[in-house]
Amino acid sequence: MDEIWKLTDEFDGRVTITDVKPPVHWTNNFDTMGGDSVWNSDGSVAMDLTNRDLTGTVKPLFGQTGTDMPATLFELNSKHYIYIEGNGFLAEILNPTDLQAITEAINGGDGVWEVLELQNLLNKSPIKLNMASRNWEEVAAEKRQQQTHAISAFNLAELTDVDDKTEHYNSITEIDDLTHLAKEIESGKYSSEDVTKAYISRAIQAHTQTNCLTEILFKDALAQARELDAYYTTEGKTKGPLHGIPISLKDQFNVKGHDTTLGYTARSFKPASEDAVLVNMLKKLGAVIICKTNLPQSIMWAETDNPLWGLTENPIIPGYTPGGSSGGESALLYSRGSIAGFGTDLGGSIRMPCNIMGLYGFKPSSCRLPYAGVPVSTEGQEHVPSSIGPLARSMSSIHDIIKAIILQEPWTQDCRSIPIPWRQNAYDDILKRKLTIGVIRDDGVVKPHPTIARMIEEAVATLEADGHEVIEWKPDFHAECIEVMDAYFTVDGCEDICRDVEAGGEPFIPAVKRLIDRGKPISVFEYWQLNKRKRQLQQAYLEKWNKAISSKTGRVVDALITPTLPHAAVPHNSIKWVGYTKVWNLLDYTALVIPAGRVEPGDLEATMDYEPRNDMDAWNKQLWEENKNDMVQNRLPVDIQIIGRNVEEEKVLAVGKVLDGLLRNR
């Protein structure tokens, strides 16, 4: 539906309606209007009209109170408005022809879908009165109430037979491979509707356990699934390679008609007017977008917490983090509430959550996938662009969804995407020959925990046993890259983040407060010098890689393997060193993480009896000593990271296929 609401100057203040002429008969349970309220027959206030900047005679048209969201349509000065008592919406309807849809939603009775439909209509472009003067806690409570209502409404309307279909739904969600599930849908074994319901059911369970969701898209998803089933019945074929595949999205991705808050209260009730380019591509490929997931305030943190939506828990061990900033995605995927999702990565935000939850995650170079329609903190900075990438439960899912997107030629729809088509030859070349792999065991700053060190050694041994060459790779320039990266985070004095937080009035979470406290703006000249340092480091690393030539084959190193984090999952607010991931963002290199194993009892026999090199190293050593028993008891997963050069996506995906196959079959 086109936008049907507008915010006008007359809604900005807080004054009383001055010319309401009682008594006025009110339909349904609304009986009279007088003074500054609409009254029910029992004397209770049905609609409080105080402090609303409207003047003139109110002409009530109709209302409905059969649910917890009483809605009222009224006319004032020849204009039509709608008011929702439960969540405070007050909006002018611009297009009279849209009155019919509103009327049907309000007069549809007290069924849960009628209420949800009304909410969805309003969410196309909701108008909030007195937004600037509202307490952030009220806004957060209202957003969470909407979320709870949408989940409850779906449960009541669509999952009444879930107990009878538990085994059927489980057979769907137990499939880890996206293409396998797509083939089952294509064969007719599963309908898109059943697949969507199965994943929504698991998503609700995951959210109940972890608080991983933000925007609830269940009704839209189910409607889309039914359209796909109708297409399949009529055409006798699927719509595309992702036909009926449930996809989740980090909250950043615009979905038409729904908020993109980034965890900021001030961005609430401002729904996107159109889909992000990537979302549009996914839908054209047949994917079903089922939900959006949580992220941290500012996005620039390896945790998932914000005042608007709250803290996301690790589904394996409560009290531990699922990582960040794409931690809502990792918690959901681990819980089988989605088969694949998309996140963003500015310093490891896809890779670290995958490491913590034992998932597959891919960070392409920043220009390979379309970023249009994906708001981000510090939007407008181009010194270290954020990357879009998938998270999934299988290596083939990562490959297949990346290939499907690139085959859609994103550069024709997003000015930042470069015109590089899918290069099958580059992918196939890796699979045909033995590889030369560089290994980084330790970045020289923070020593990895015993589990991580063991995983690296096992990967090296597995590669060598299969005939691949592994050479040592010194982390030259890494400290300088991280220094420049950290400087970039605060070049604006954190003004961008502060504006968003202060607009809503919520508090800064501790990690963001620490960031802004050290954030001092720099001059344009100083910024230019920082950019020069970045280019010098990128050139130095390019030359380093070009010189890393195999003595056996004469070829340069194909890829690197490194830790993703120096540890597995840790308690909330304990991740401090992300140097193993963010160096590759500064270089804009391609990065993939794949599951490598779990913390095992034998890891307790390893010692970390060494003198820490710095405060971060000491902190990480302490994390192991304090939490190693929990890590072993819960057999926490860990990933290994594979690195390729700029825009070497096909090559890195192929190396990932090789190493994943070896690790899974050892």
Image: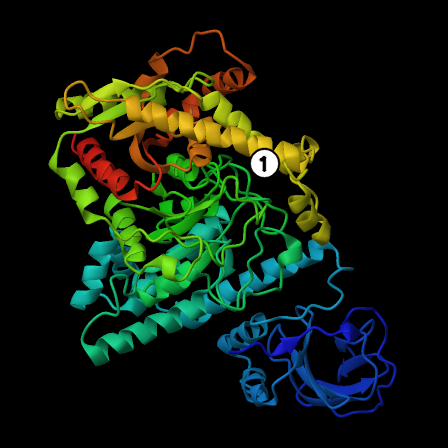
The C terminus: image quadrant: top left
* Residue situated in front as seen by the camera: 529 or 647: 529
Q: Which quarter of the picture shows residue 230?
A: bottom left
The answer, for residue 14, to whether it is visible in the render is yes
Colour approach in the figure:
rainbow
Q: Residue at x 57, y 86 (%)?
A: 98
The answer, for residue 189, to whether it is visible in the render is no
Q: Residue at x 79, y 86 (%)?
A: 33
Left/right of residue 306 with respect to residue 562 in the rendered view: right
Q: Is residue 226 above or below residue 432?
A: below
Q: Is residue 465 above or below residue 348?
A: above
Q: Is residue 99 above or below residue 277?
A: below
Instruction: For label 1, count other residues whose C-alpha is less than 10 Å away and answer few (under 14), some (14-19) or many (20+).
Output: some
Q: Position of residue 619 (x, y in %)?
A: 53, 19
Q: Position of residue 177 (x, y in %)?
A: 24, 50
Q: Position of residue 189 (x, y in %)?
A: 18, 66
Q: Is residue 564 above or below residue 90?
A: above
Label 1 secondary element: loop
Give the mark count: 1
Say which residue label 1 marks: 489
Q: Residue at x 57, y 52 (%)?
A: 262
Q: Amino acid at mark 1?
A: Phe
Q: Position of residue 136 (x, y in %)?
A: 71, 54
Q: Which quarter of the picture shows residue 56?
A: bottom right
Left/right of residue 141 with respect to residue 229 in the rendered view: right
Left/right of residue 341 with respect to residue 321 in the rendered view: left
* Residue situated in front as seen by the camera: 15 or 164: 15
* Residue situated in front as seen by the camera: 563 or 221: 563
